[in-house]
Amino acid sequence: MLPSSVFALQERGKLLFPGLALALTIAGAAMFLSEHYGAPVMLFALLIGIAFNFLSADPACKPGLEFASKSVLRGGIVLLGARITLGDMVSIGGEGLATVAGLIAATIACGFVCARFLNKGWRFALLTGASVAICGASAALAIASVIPHNDRTERNVLFTVVAVTTLSTLAMVVYPIAFSLAGLSSSESGFLIGATIHDVAQVVGAGYSMSIEAGDIATIVKLLRVAMLPVVLLVVAVVLARAKSGLDAVRLPTFVIGFVLVAGLNSIGWVPALAANAAVSLAPWLLVIAIAALGVRTNLKAMLDLGWQHVAVIIIETLFLLVAAMICVKAGVLG
């Protein structure tokens, strides 16, 4: 006879399998389409997932979809820490580090100001501000895992993912042309691309389309922004906990601690290269699976009913980040 723990695990697996299999199938299709047609994988996962929204209420699929959109998501965020090393961050210099941190803080603040004027809540302001300022869809998903949910949270998360992915793709095409016409050097262009484009894949594409130097700098700056994600998550978790029930009640989410731990161990070289490479390869898969599950759970009509204010907030944040980064470059932040 099987031990009770093994039996319980088997039963749990049977319960989650249909929803997880659906999310994994959608993620695989999205990966295939992205590789063959060059469009953002997150966008494909969302659109295909939304097409299967009719399965979101199916009792067989519901548990697995919820698990994929929460637990699988958090696992992917933890593994993102394997992208980060202290050496990459130090290579940009103290002034560059301070500039990137300042741009992140200013962009998130801009999100709160825009949301207030356009009558949007603080949750939406934080979701969009962090996704624009830090690392696009990954940041939106991570922030959503920390903040308390309401009846609009999933819809706002999906909108944010679609918006930042679309804007990143547009920026990947437009920014290199604009920076070349502006007569910026490779180092300046690389810094701007890394500091302003939302998603990592688009940063890499835009940077190396200009030059190897621009691509290297853009990648380092972008990874530095990703490295700021746990800092922002820690701040958000502490502020929310203090606002709710005092400092003594602060309990950091386990996945945030995991992200920080993986990033720290990787930075000091305690993560074997093989394990780090495996984590870096696995993390995007887990995030795409989570996005696919969120897509299935999202009603398209609810997305279409959001209104122009949602779009305005995220466009203003994107333009604010671009202008602020340009000002920093013109002020000689790169030395």
Image (cartoon, rainbow, N blue to C red):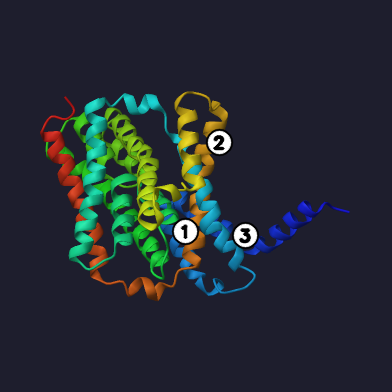
The residues bearing labels 2 and 1 have C-alpha atoms spaced at a distance of 22 Å
CA gap between label 1 and label 3 equals 14 Å
Q: Which residue is mark 1?
A: 45
| Pointer 2 or 1: first along the chain | 1
Instruction: Give the x, y percent position of residue 38.
Output: 40, 50
Label 2, on which residue? 278
Residue 71 versus residue 306 in the image, above or below: above
- The kind of residue on which mark 3 rests is Ala
Q: Which residue is mark 3?
A: 21
With 239 as the anchor, is 73 left or right in this view?
right
**Placement of 151 over or under 291, stated as above or below:** below
Q: Quadrant of residue 56?
A: bottom right
Which residue corresponds to the image point at 55% horizontal and 53% vertical from the top-left? 71
Residue 316 position by quadrant? bottom left
In the rendering, at what x and y percent does residue 69 appear?
Answer: 51, 58
Type of amino acid at the residue the image marks with label 1: Ala
- Among the two numbered marks 2 and 3 on one chain, the one whose residue lies closer to the N terminus: 3
